[in-house]
Amino acid sequence: MPARIVITGAGGQVGRFLGGELTAQGRDLLACTSSQWDITDPAAGAAIVAPGDVVINCAALTAVDVAQTDEARAYAVNAAGAANVARACAANGARLIHISTDYVFSGEFDGAPRPYEVDDPVGPRSVYGASKLAGERQVQDVLPEATVVRTAWVYTGAGGDFVGTMRRLECERDHVDVVADQTGSPTYVGDLARALLLIADDPAPASVLHVANTGAASRYELARAVFAGIGADPQRVRPVGTDRHPRPAPRPVYSALSTARYDADHSPMRSWQDGLDAALAALG
């Protein structure tokens, strides 16, 4: 029988979708929002986690610019909070899948950029990336058998994520200026959720995995693909540099992820283009 899945951060983008997938499958699920399991409370997990559970830690402070200006909060959630979840799993005989980010990488290459492998050197440029890297390390220190899953540019296409924002702006503006000098791995949340469930059902997954839709796209290329996918003219998207949209936190110039290690043991991730097509089709 599949293990019970416990989700932290069940009110967030990934946690909500993952909970919906598990419910649709009739799986044994305990979905905890931040009010039901405050991971910054070291004692909170003791009464929640049970032997044999698989905990998927979706709880995080993911607002990159908020993290940059509130470092204490970022580390409390993304580092100390992650360690608290790992301790609850270690104490109660549960497995842990901890979600991390492409922002642990610097985006700087000596030569031509290429998708990051799981064992490439890290070098976060922002407080968000540094706090998530600290969380990875604390999880692995507390629970060496845990699995860290790095993902990137996750979207549903609804609400305030990048794809959802492009859909909204297409209706509101004649032209949209989008940065063309930030490249990553756009990832449909549905594909990430399905991959997380495969990892949860794998009795011995690798210690670090990259899970993202394959290929690399700039924000500009992704925006054009969104416009084309909803029947709008992609020429209405215009490329600009990051300097045109200054933000408190620096972003990696290039942070695409290689899924080679994940693909070796599981159904390979599909391309970002196919993921986007699926997301837009699901939205109707």
Image (cartoon, rainbow, N blue to C red):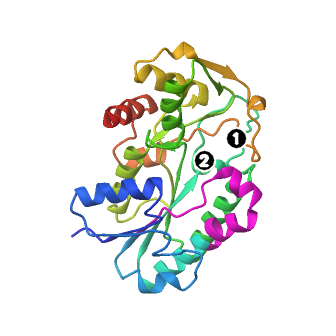
Q: How many marks?
A: 2
Tell whether 226 sits left or right of 248. Answer: left
Badges 1 and 2: C-beta atoms under 8 Å apart?
A: yes
Residue 47 is inside the magenta segment: no
**Callout 2, which amino acid?**
Asp
Question: Foreground residue, 259 or 132?
Answer: 132
Residues shaded magenta? 55-80
Q: CA distance from mark 1 to mark 2?
A: 9 Å
Give the residue displayed 46% in from the left and 53% down from the top. Answer: 13
Q: Which residue does the numbered mark 1 point to in the structure image?
A: 252
Q: Which residue is mark 2?
A: 102
Measured along the vertical axis of the image, is residue 170 above or below residue 37?
above
Percent coordinates x, y for residue 137 in the rendering: 64, 66
Front-lying residue, 235 or 46? 235
Task: Please identify the dominant SS of the magenta region.
Answer: helix
Amino acid type, label 1:
Pro
Q: Position of residue 35 (x, y in %)?
A: 49, 73
Q: Residue furthest front?
A: 172
Q: Is residue 56 magenta?
A: yes
Question: Can you give x and y, in whole percent of width and height, for residue 101 in the image?
Answer: 58, 52
Place of residue 100 in the rendered image (x, y in percent of width and height, measured from the top left): 56, 56
Query: Would residue 189 appear left or right of 38 to someone viewing this image?
Result: left
Secondary element under disc 1, as helix, strand or loop, is loop
Residue at the spot x=54%, y=42% of the render?
A: 153
Q: Dot 2: what SS? A: helix
Q: Is residue 58 visible?
A: yes
Could you tell me which quadrant the C terminus lies in?
Answer: top left
Asked which quadrant contains residue 140, the reply is bottom right
